[in-house]
Image (cartoon, rainbow, N blue to C red):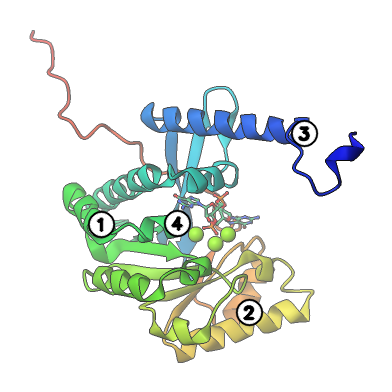
Amino acid sequence: HSKAAGRNAVRFFDPAMQARVVQRATLQRELRHGLRDGELALFGQPIVDAQAQTCGQEALLRWRHPVRGMVPPAEFIPVAEQTGLILPIGQWVLREACRVLARWAADPARAGWTLAVNLSARQLRQPDFVASVQAALADAGADPRRLKLELTESLLLHDVEDTIAKMEALASLGIQFALDDFGTGYSSLAYLKRLPLTQLKIDRSFVRDLLSDPNDAAIARTILQLAQSLEMEVVAEGVETVGQYEVLRAMGCRLFQGYHFGRPAPLEPADPPAAAPAQPAG
Ligand code: C2E
Ligand code: MG
Ligand code: MG
Ligand code: MG
């Protein structure tokens, strides 16, 4: 180590840092190609009601990497957000989700289900976001009332007035909004009241130790009371055991999601929207 560089000097030749930069650049390039080459897939996880009947799903993105296998979103969404790739990826997710909804509408067992799509803050900041959601719905022939958009509290750190205006425009089309991972972020109750939200999702970190940690139980109960007075639904995330389900149900929770009810599994496959190839004659 060079003493002259000093403790606070930028170290240009830190090999670990350089390795991370190269790794990120590789990931970014591979992700761009993966989007182009159809390596992204939409999984769905059931959301169930108080009778444990499925009433919808949450769409969860997966990347089937040709070498690394299934890459979870936590490993590539942050990079996609930093580089702006989240915009075309988010568009793909929305359009794919709308096509799934259109298929469900034709299936009596699923016609009433909603499909929830996760949004990044950056998507909502796009000036044409409302129009692009409308186009995705119209092109697929999907019912806006079956589409739910999941936002996180971090979204409220940016231009709140613009966010509210876009949410209201989308809500007037019938689209519903859920606040994801509720309780983990910066949340002003004053904003919460102003947003056209239909649902709060209790973060799974409060559900995990619900039966053993009285603080988590108190938080879950508080969120349920808050939602009731704001006339919002609550989904408990990360329900892994029947015990968690029963305690939450006794607290008044009516919607649940977690491995106890079903793990994320591929949503229906994406056929190309183009017409089927002509059948050979004879
Ligand atoms: P999220 O929106 O909070 O999604 C729920 C996550 O919890 C999913 O992780 C799901 O697989 C996991 N989960 C569900 N039930 C259980 C359970 O019982 N136990 C445990 N331990 N985990 C459970 P996943 O699929 O890895 O997604 C992670 C995050 O990535 C999501 O968190 C969401 O923030 C983000 N994400 C996923 N798909 C998209 C997308 O299309 N766009 C954007 N912007 N973000 C996405
Ligand atoms: Mg979510
Ligand atoms: Mg969540
Ligand atoms: Mg989460």
Of the residues shown, which amino acid type is indicated by label 1?
Asp
Q: CA distance from mark 1 to mark 3?
A: 42 Å
The residue singled out by tag 1 in the image is 128
For discs 2 and 4, the disc positioned in front in the rendered view: 4
Instruction: Indicate which disc, 2 or 3, sits on the residue closer to the N terminus.
Output: 3
Instruction: Indicate which disc, 4 or 3, sits on the residue closer to the N terminus.
Output: 3
SS at badge 2: helix
For discs 4 and 1, the disc positioned in front in the rendered view: 1
Of the residues shown, which amino acid type is indicated by label 2?
Ala
Q: Is residue 245 left or right of residue 66?
A: right
Kindly identify the residue that appears in the image at 43 percent across and 63 percent down: 150
Kindly identify the residue that appears in the image at 35 percent across and 36 percent down: 269
Instruction: Indicate which disc, 4 or 1, sits on the residue closer to the N terminus.
Output: 4
**Across the whole image, how many numbered discs are drawn on residues?**
4
Q: Is residue 194 above or below residue 167?
A: below
Of the residues shown, which amino acid type is indicated by label 4?
Ser
Kindly identify which numbered label has been placed on residue 14.
3
Q: CA distance from mark 1 to mark 2?
A: 36 Å
Q: Is residue 11 visible?
A: yes
Label 4 environment density (alpha carbons within 10 Å; few <14, some 14–19, many ≥20):
some
For discs 1 and 2, the disc positioned in front in the rendered view: 1
The residue singled out by tag 4 in the image is 120
